[in-house]
Image: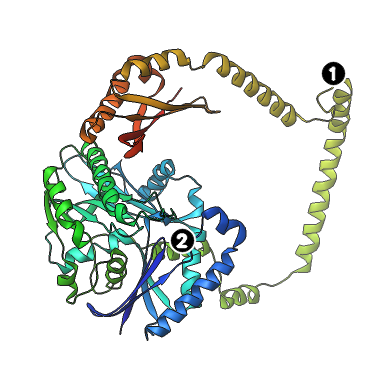
Amino acid sequence: MNSLGIYFGSKLIAISETKGKKLVNNTQVLQAVAPAGELEEKVPMEAKMVELVALFKDELRRGNIDSKRASICLSGKDLIIRNFEMPVLPRQELHAAVNFEAKKYIPFKVEEMVSDFQVQLDKINNKNLILFMGIKRDVLDRYIAIMNELNIKVDAIEYSAFSALRALKLANVNLKGINGVLWGDLKSEEEVNFIVLEDGFPLFSRDIFLTGGPGAEATEGAAEESSGMALEKLKTEIRVSLDYYHRKFPSKDIKNLFFMSNPENRSAIESFLSELGLSAKLLDVNKFIGQSVPYSLNFIKGYCVSLFKAIKLDISINLLTAQKKAHAAGERGLKLDKSQISDLIRGMKIDFRVVVLGILICAAIFGFGYYRITPLSTNINEIMGNRIKVSSIDEKAKYEDLVSISTKTKNKLGAIGDLVNKQTYLTQVLEAIAGASSSGIQLTDLVFNKKDDGSSDLIITGMVYLGDADSEFGAANQFISNLKRDPEFSKYFNTINIASLNQGMLDKRNVTNFRIECKGNR
């Protein structure tokens, strides 16, 4: 039986049909692209889905594709993928602990998403390495609804960069040890994926958008320059990614780095990776597919996910399975079948003497209760009448109401006290920033935000111009290091990270732009 693999990219949907591991057919569907706001305001999601389903049906009919089972993979823009460490816990406690930890990385409620995770034991450090993946429920339901409209049963839903790891299996690559992977297509506006694996388990993964992110529009007349600019930006992003990885895993050096890219960029990428001290190894798509096809990362992802049943990965996360487990858990409960209910009713016999006795007992209890409560009610009314009247409090307020009012008042007084006692004095912070900067660094924006919980955030935006990209990159990193070492600055901000570091233009000169995010705990 033939299998379908479908990759939902930012602008293209790649469809591959395979029999076993052999490619039978491949095609693509171009999605209508418009700015996000325009889509939301002018085009209802239902109308978009109807249009997409119609395009899908036409393309499947044109390609004579009639398979009714498919595996799909999604772009990183639809998913939340995080790696973090946790102590070794009993299995029954692990799920709740992972969900609690994942809340730090999710910008919405955990209940609004479908999630799954995989655990790898780090025996050397005696810790659990967690690979967490999640997707918003409504987004997942939308993809499944599209497949239902096409009358196609879905077997699996994966992250596209992980699906493409089947290319390593096809090429008989030995994944023992620490290996890096770079999936790139510098001619496409789709994401570039960078992954670091330890014995096939992802330690680190990152999506890189070389054109400004999904939905970004290409400027007219920039086709000739786009490939060169994309290559330079890719180099910068790879440096940033490796810098972050080495800081997080200083003892786990990358042994080999396998990459796929457009033919015209392969030698440049290989030379760049060699300069970084990495053993770069090219994966030739045509060799492991067994036939000549034009290079397209979209096609590779669609083809690789079609091999879901033919080639098993070391990564077991399947969001479709996670959704089914969530539904099963929600429906699970105490249920009696019809035969059990019938047997229960059949065994019951009614004795009217017992019923009458029960009624008399209830009446006696009610009468005795009324007798006991009458003097107490009279006493309460007298106390309520003698209570001092306060204009802002209802005279009929109960004790619980008064406790609630008292608690709210204390909270307000506490908030006022926090405003007075926990102020952040920016003079010391600004002096620290000035002292940490060096020649060539120019700050363009400072954004300070004081939150309701007393914590504060500071975003520093600037640029470096030294005439050399590597020197500018080093100057920006030195600036961050100086801030971390400054005792006054670190007193207010305990977390200082670089959010972005990329090349840009200013007055026809190449400069390095940076953005630093500082978080405080005061």
Give amino acid for label 2: Ala
Q: Residue at x 28, y 64 (%)?
A: 297
Residue 176 visible here: no
Q: Residue at x 42, y 43 (%)?
A: 100
In the image shown, does 243 or 474 lie closer to the viewer? 474
**Is tag 2's residue or tag 1's residue first in the polypeptide sequence?**
2
Give amino acid for label 1: Ile
Taking the image as shown, residue 107 lies to the left or right of residue 503, namely right
| Residue linked to disc 1 | 388
Quadrant in the picture for residue 436: top left
Q: Residue 157, image x and y in percent?
A: 38, 65
Asked if 469 appears above or below 71 in the picture, the reply is above
Q: Residue at x 14, y 42 (%)?
A: 276
Q: Residue 22, image x and y in percent?
A: 22, 79
In the image shown, does 254 or 499 lie closer to the viewer? 499
Taking the image as shown, residue 134 lies to the left or right of residue 361, namely left
What's the CA distance linking mark 2 and mark 1? Answer: 55 Å
Quadrant in the picture for residue 125: top left
Asked whether disc 2 touches disc 1, contact meaning CB atoms under 8 Å apart, the reply is no
| Residue linked to disc 2 | 326
In the image shown, does 381 or 81 lie closer to the viewer? 81
Taking the image as shown, residue 332 lies to the left or right of residue 490, namely right
Asked if 307 appears above or below 519 in the picture, the reply is below
Quadrant containing the N terminus is: bottom left
